[in-house]
Image (cartoon, rainbow, N blue to C red):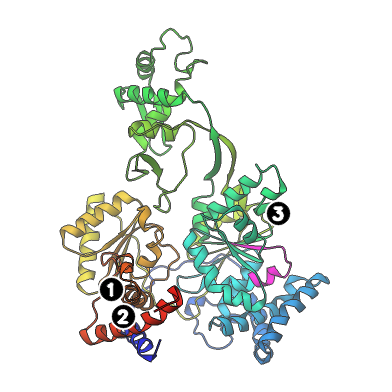
Amino acid sequence: MGWHFATACLAAVRAFAPASNVATPRVAPRHMLELPKFSFDSLFKQDATTISREPGWLKKARDVSGYADRVDQIDALAGAMAAKSDAELRAVTDDLRARRAGGATLDSLIPEAFAACREASTRALGLRHYDVQLVGGMALHEGKLAEMATGEGKTLVATCPLYLRSLDMRGTHVITVNDYLARRDSETLQPLFDFLGLTVGVVQSESTSAQRRAAYECDVTYVTNNELGFDYLRDHLAYETEELTLTLRPLNFAIVDEADSILVDEARTPLIISGEGDGDAPAKYDAATLAASFLERGRDYEVDYKGRRVTLTDDGYTRAVDLLGVQDDPLGLFGTESKWAAYLFPSLNAKELYFCERDYLVDAGEVKIVDEFTGRVMEGRRWNGGLHQAVEAKEKVEVKPEQVTVASITYQSLFLLYPTLSGMTGTAQSEAKELSDTYKLDVLKVPTAKPLVRADGGDLVFKSKLDKFRYVLRDINERHQRGQPVLCGTTSIEDATLVSELLRNEDVPHRVLNANPKLARKESEIMSQAGRKGAVTIATNMAGRGTDILLGGNAALTARLRLREAVAPAVDGRLGALVEVDKTLYPVPELDASLDARLTAAAAEAAVFLREEIFGAA
């Protein structure tokens, strides 16, 4: 394609790269002393946040000093591993598997396995594990939850224990919160695992049964918690062995990414596979919804917002019986024939507790649930207990037949099936007791590779929601004027929309990420640009979770988008509209005239070669 195109590519990346004159953040003052749990280690060791990172510092650090000797053993093997050829390093996997099959314990293989994985990562990825990342890896192997600060490389940390556990050839699973992270991590780390001779699979929401089966048969499988749960349920409904995907072999070892969200926030969320029930139910839900509209809160029923349930008063019960025409039935709403209670109470819940744009969306005549934890639309999911039908009747869309539960399991029950369960997250100490009580998971706070200089502010409490949003608006505006990038997280689509409207009134340019299905696949790419100068991004609490936000933005992605805009139309003019960058989502600035001309010329030169490759002729 010529050196002109390569030169233009390099120039484009430099044009979008962040400026280097970034102010160093202040160190947050420590106003309070947090007393550690009593142990002899805490008496004689130092807090890792205050230790300078000179050689041997791990042995002085509280909580992680017990791993220091093993880290030294791994370091001692670094020279021998570096001296091996690629083929010899690959052969280490076969040797370790043979020793494991011969009776060697996994713990005894840690030094060599971790050293081999570290050297392979250096060669295949250009990334070498820090000592603290080795500590995190050992904690995961032991079945602990490693709490690591944002940006400390949790993705890389998982590779060493995955490699070690794969020596058993019984499969390992990395469980993530969304398809994007599963795909990104598997693609990012595949060169490393290929180098070591391991197979890698990824399960996506659109994967077929054959693809799922192949992925679960790999040494390392990346999968979301949703897909894992439903594959488990489907396997238990299968009639033939050929229909199985996940359970062809026993569950073995799992690392849960963003563990606080999956293991705690969603622990009791039931995963349900349903079948169709009563075909007459839709008409009854319409009637129950109409009856509920005549009942008044406070007079006919009481609402428990915390417990999320509605209770009829005596007068309300009598009025409901009259409205539904079952006065002559001695059992009233609970009659064995009509069973009106099963339709009225979901209708009252839908009326008082579930709201459009917060709990669900109506899209093309279909009610779609919005995940309260992620803010994303949960495609294909339906509430049970008649609630979904009640919401459909409330929104006056087609009421689909009632569903009957065929199979169900909670995440808590599912993850307890793993003999060894571990996890990674940036925030776990606040849930440490619950994690210990429920999953027998101990939390290990892994120190940062370098002393932390980020300023962590305290919580601000306001008298009212209005006061809070006034402060948020003023704070965002001030920071935006200074050119400081701002990421504003909200707990609901409603709040994200409100903040967006307030910023729009102040003429503050911003981007919003919520439950829009059209942006679900792009949200992580958009989130990666939240660090650009002056960028303001509003997002529900887990939109783009796990995405690296680089200060100055993701220059490589921005350059790639701009290059695609230039090259695709040069290959075929019809492609121009398909690759045009939406400037409201991606902050791609205009290039100066000389660079733009060079890019256009390079794209035209490259197009000749690309047309020959794609179409077979110039």
Q: Dividing the picture into quarters, in which one does residue 534 lie?
A: bottom left
Residue 344 shows in this picture: no
Bin the neighbour count of mark 1 within 10 Å (Cα to Cα): few under 14, some 14-19, many 20 and up. some
Q: Which residue lies furthest to the right in this view?
A: 102
Q: Which residue lies furthest to the top in this view?
A: 328
**Residue at x 46%, y 9% (from the top left corner):** 329
540, 426: nearer the viewer: 540
Q: Residue 60: x and y, percent? A: 58, 81
Which segment did they paint magenta?
162-174
Q: Residue 248: x and y, percent? A: 70, 54
Q: How many labels sit on residues? A: 3
154, 308: nearer the viewer: 154
Q: Do the residues labelled 2 and 1 touch (CB within 8 Å)?
A: yes
Looking at the image, is mark 2 or mark 1 earlier in the sequence?
2
Does 365 sit left or right of 439 as displayed? left
Q: Name the residue under label 2.
A: 16
Q: Mark 3 points at which residue?
A: 248
Q: Name the residue under label 1.
A: 588
The image quadrant where one finds the C terminus is bottom left
The amino acid type of the residue labelled 2 equals Phe
Instruction: Give the answer, above or below, for where 27 lies relative to 212.
Output: below
**Residue at x 55%, y 41% (from the top left corner):** 272
**Residue at x 29%, y 85% (from the top left corner):** 601
Q: Residue 112: x and y, percent? A: 70, 80
Circle on res. 214: none
Instruction: Give the answer, above or below, for where 355 lies relative to 257.
Output: above
The amino acid type of the residue labelled 3 equals Leu
The amino acid type of the residue labelled 1 equals Val
- In 3D space, how far apart are the residues under numbered discs 2 and 3 (Cα atoms)? 48 Å
**Residue at x 33%, y 85% (from the top left corner):** 602
Q: Dividing the picture into quarters, in which one does residue 25 lie?
A: bottom left
